[in-house]
Image: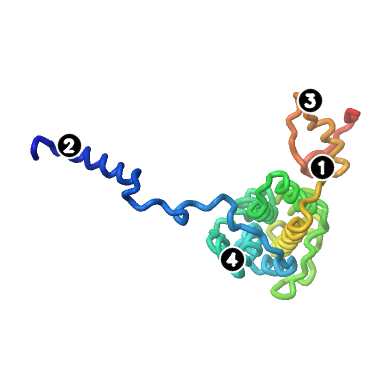
C-alpha cells in the first residue's frame, strides 16, 4: 500500500470523514431536524367548560380521575386542533388513579389539573397561582356538583366539602357524609362526577386567565394564623412550607401558644 499500513489508512479516512461533516461536505442539519423550542405549539384556546365536564365523566370508567380530567381537555384539542396535541401519550395518565397508583396522596383529578395548567402556562408565578386557585376551590367547594345527562347508575350522589386535596382524606370525608364505604360503587360515581367538576373548573380558570391573567390568592384565615407561627421565614426552627388547609391534617391542642404579632 505504498508504505501506508491499514491502521494509518483507517485513521486518515476517519479524519476525512470528520472534516467533511464539519466542513460542509455532508448535508447540514436542518431546522426541521432540530427539537422545537420548549413549550412551542402548546397554545391554549378558549374551551367550553361544560363540554369538558361531560367528556371527563365519559372517560372515567376503567381509566380513573387523572386520565379523565387530562384527556377531556388535551384530548379534545387533539381531536380539534391536531398537532402537537395528537402526540401526547395519554395512557400514561392512568397512573394517577386513587392518588397515584392507589396510594391515596394528591387527588388524581387535581394532579391532572396541575398538569394541564403546566402544559399551557410556562411562567412559574402564573402557573402556581392558577394551580392554587383550582386546589383552593377543591378544598372548599361542595362536591360533586356535576349532574350527568346520561350513563349514571345513581340519580343522587351526596356531596361534601373535602377540606383537603389528598385523595384518601377527600374520600374519607365524603364517606362519612354518605355513610358509604370507599369501595362502594356510589363512591366510584362520586369520583367520576368529581372528575367532571375538576375538568370544568380547570377550563374555567384557564379561560379567564387567557383574557385577564391569574388572580392573586391568599390562604384561609385559620391556616394564615398557623403560618404566622409555623412557617415564618425569619424563624430558623420552622420547617413548614405549604398553602394547604392546615386543619385537614392537624388539630390544635390546648393550651396552644398565641401566634406572634
Q: Is residue 172 above or below residue 191?
A: above
Q: Is residue 75 above or below residue 106?
A: below
Q: Is residue 120 visible?
A: yes
Marks 3/2: CA–CA distance? 69 Å
Residue 43: horizontal and vertical position, in percent? 64, 58
Q: Which residue is mark 2?
A: 7
Label 4 packing within 10 angstroms: few (<14), some (14-19), many (20+): some
- Viewer-side residue, 87 vs 29: 29
Instruction: Please tell me the numbered disc located at residue 235.
Output: 3
Residues at marks 1 and 4 touching, judged by CB atoms closer than 8 Å: no
Name which of mark 3 and mark 1 comes first in the sequence: 3
Badge 3 marks a residue whose secondary structure is loop
Instruction: Please tell me the numbered disc located at residue 47.
Output: none
- Viewer-side residue, 203 vs 251: 203
Q: Which residue is mark 4?
A: 78
Marks 3/1: CA–CA distance? 22 Å
| Nearer mark to the viewer, of 3 and 2 | 2
Residue 226: horizontal and vertical position, in percent? 84, 35
Residue 41: horizontal and vertical position, in percent? 59, 58
Q: Which residue is mark 1?
A: 247
Name which of mark 2 and mark 4 comes first in the sequence: 2
Name which of mark 1 and mark 2 comes first in the sequence: 2
Residues at marks 1 and 2 touching, judged by CB atoms closer than 8 Å: no
| Nearer mark to the viewer, of 3 and 1 | 3
| Nearer mark to the viewer, of 1 and 2 | 2
Q: Is residue 173 visible?
A: no
- Viewer-side residue, 108 vs 13: 13
Label 1 packing within 10 angstroms: few (<14), some (14-19), many (20+): few
Badge 2 marks a residue whose secondary structure is helix
Amino acid at each position: 500500500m505504498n508504505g501506508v499500513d491499514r491502521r494509518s489508512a483507517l485513521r486518515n479516512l476517519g479524519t476525512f470523514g470528520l472534516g467533511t461533516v464539519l466542513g460542509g461536505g455532508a448535508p447540514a442539519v436542518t431546522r426541521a431536524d432540530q427539537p422545537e423550542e420548549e413549550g412551542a405549539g402548546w397554545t391554549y384556546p378558549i374551551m367550553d367548560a361544560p363540554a369538558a365536564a361531560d367528556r371527563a365523566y365519559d372517560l372515567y370508567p376503567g381509566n380513573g380521575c387523572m386520565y379523565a380530567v387530562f384527556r377531556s381537555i388535551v384530548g379534545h384539542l387533539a381531536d380539534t386542533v391536531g398537532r402537537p396535541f395528537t402526540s401526547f401519550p395519554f395512557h400514561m395518565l392512568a397512573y394517577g388513579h386513587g392518588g397515584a397508583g392507589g396510594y391515596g396522596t394528591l387527588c388524581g383529578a387535581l394532579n391532572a389539573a396541575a398538569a394541564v395548567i403546566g402544559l399551557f402556562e410556562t411562567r412559574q408565578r402564573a402557573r402556581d397561582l392558577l394551580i392554587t386557585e383550582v386546589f383552593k376551590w377543591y378544598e372548599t367547594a361542595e362536591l360533586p356538583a356535576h349532574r350527568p345527562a346520561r350513563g349514571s347508575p345513581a340519580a343522587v350522589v351526596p356531596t361534601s366539602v373535602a377540606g383537603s386535596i389528598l385523595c384518601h382524606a377527600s374520600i374519607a370525608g365524603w364517606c362519612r357524609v354518605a355513610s358509604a364505604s370507599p369501595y362502594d360503587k356510589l363512591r366510584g360515581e362520586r369520583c367520576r362526577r368529581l372528575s367532571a367538576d375538576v375538568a370544568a373548573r380547570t377550563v374555567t380558570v384557564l379561560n379567564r386567565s387567557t383574557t385577564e391573567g391569574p388572580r392573586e390568592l391568599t390562604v384561609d384565615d385559620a391556616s394564615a394564623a398557623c403560618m404566622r407561627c409555623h412557617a415564618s421565614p425569619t424563624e430558623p426552627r420552622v420547617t413548614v412550607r405549604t398553602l394547604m388547609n392546615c386543619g385537614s391534617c392537624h388539630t390544635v391542642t390546648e393550651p396552644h401558644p398565641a401566634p406572634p404579632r
